[in-house]
Amino acid sequence: MALDTTSLLGLSTNYDFNFAEMLAATKTQMEVPITELGTKKTTITTKQSELNTIESLVISARSYTRTLSSSSTYLEKSVSVSNSVLSASATSTAEAGYYSVEVTQLAQKSSWLTSSGYASKDTAITTSEKALTYTIGGVSKSITIAAGSTLESLVSTINANEDSKVTASIINTGDSSSPYKLSIVAKTAGEENRISDLKLGTETIFADQIASDNNILNAKVKYNGVEYQRQTNSSIDDIILGVTLNLSEKGTSAITISQNTSSIKENITNMINSLNTLITTVKEKTAAKTDSGEPAALAFSSVNNIPYLINSILQSNISTSDGTVTNLSDLGITMSDGLYTIDSSTLTEALSSSFTKVSNIFSGYTDSSSNSVDGIGTKIHDLLMNFTDTGGIVNSEKAKYSTNLEFINEEIEKKTETINNKYEILKNEYIQADIAIAKLSSQEDYIKQMIESENND
């Protein structure tokens, strides 16, 4: 009797299990929570990046508010001179005004020259060892000169002496027979550094090139009808209070010292521009709906209060030291479409005609009762500092996202470890199943052969 090969234990069908695909599909399903955590992590890192951008803009604006909030900023002076006779700089102690300075004489260096010329630089000057002696600044100096020294070796010996207060060189006078002479010049200008008693051994072979009368080595400056003598042409800071002079040539120069309004105007402009950039960026990063229709990365974040907080200060009034109440609009700074514009001419005029008021508006002042009144610059600077200080808006948001990110990273690590462990268990189970099915498949083939053999019989 023939047997039904299709009904025997269901083994007549071929087994077709792809355990590798099944295992991969299972793992993918297990990793769904990790993928979701990864998406959250990406969202948080995007928020952190946006917060870093805002923080950077806050710090940038703070550099200008710091300057404008400092009273010393309004003490700085600018200096202009009428010609090339001299240059000048001024400290905050200088009085604004016009100064006329006449330079009647520039400081010089004491200079000596050998009386006679020499035909060659290699001409021997000494036949035996001698001492080059001189006095400078009331101090006697001596340099040992070897026998047979030439002009060139004399120059080398003098200039190599660490204690030397003079510099030696060879000059060419152009004389047809004896053009070369030895020049000895003081390293420092002024009568206090005049060279005297210059000799080589006992010989007086040098001649003083600048007469020692009328303090001719000193610089001479006339100011307010008084002649001042100084040892140098540079860094003269004790003639006009708070002013340093550097002399270049003879003549009369007009010095104008004024408040450094251009620098202050530049800082005000930079502050307003940087705050505009900060306000614009915060609004963009916190928009509830972007062009794509989706909320911005920091939508509903507390940093969206930054523009409001800045505006509340910039649009406030302040009483100045003269008792008047004023605000930024008096300086030409007004709001339009949520941002600030500056009328350059109005600001320039305010700095020129009401400098103290401008200083009061930004840096504040001390009133008649010795109470400190903060200026707008000070208030804005403190506000910007608060944004990034511990507990501030930006700092708190960054701390919150850092904590969230740390938690997510820990969760990803834990879940990854759990999934890997389960995966290994499943893999082993599938391997065992695969082995078992392979045995069943082998048995099926054997049974089929037996059935086929029986049927053939």
Image (tube, grey):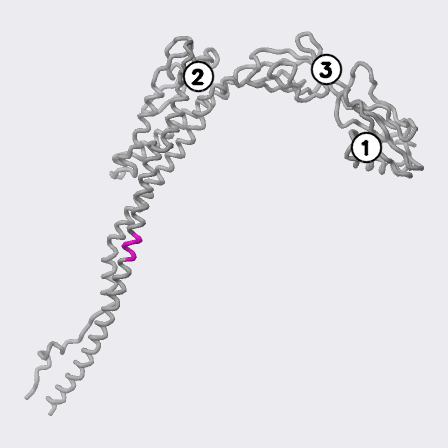
Give the amino acid type for the residue marked by disc 3 in the picture: Gln
Q: Amino acid at mark 1?
A: Ser
Q: Read off the magenta span.
A: 412-417
Q: Are marks 3 and 2 in contact (CB under 8 Å)?
A: no
Q: Earlier in the sequence, mark 3 or mark 1?
A: 1
Helix, strand or loop under label 3: strand
Q: Point out residue 353 in the picture as x, y percentages from the top left corner.
A: 47, 11
Point out residue 414 in the picture as x, y percentages from the top left corner.
Answer: 29, 54
**What numbered label is drawn on residue 229?**
3
Q: Gap in Å between the C-alphas at discs 2 and 1? A: 59 Å
Give the structural element (helix, strand or loop) at label 2.
Answer: helix
Name the residue carrying label 1. Answer: 169
In the rendering, at what x and y percent does residue 211 appear?
83, 18
* Res. 346 visible in picture: no
Disc marking residue 73: none
Relative side of 337 to 124, left or right: left
Q: Which one is earlier in the sequence, the residue at label 2 or at label 1?
A: 1
* Marks 3 and 2, the one that precedes in the sequence: 3
Answer few, some or many: residues within 10 Å of disc 3's Cα (few below 14, many 20 plus, some between 14 and 19): many
Q: Which residue is mark 2?
A: 347
Res 15 visible = yes
Q: Residues within 10 Å of mark 2 (few under 14, many from 20)?
A: many
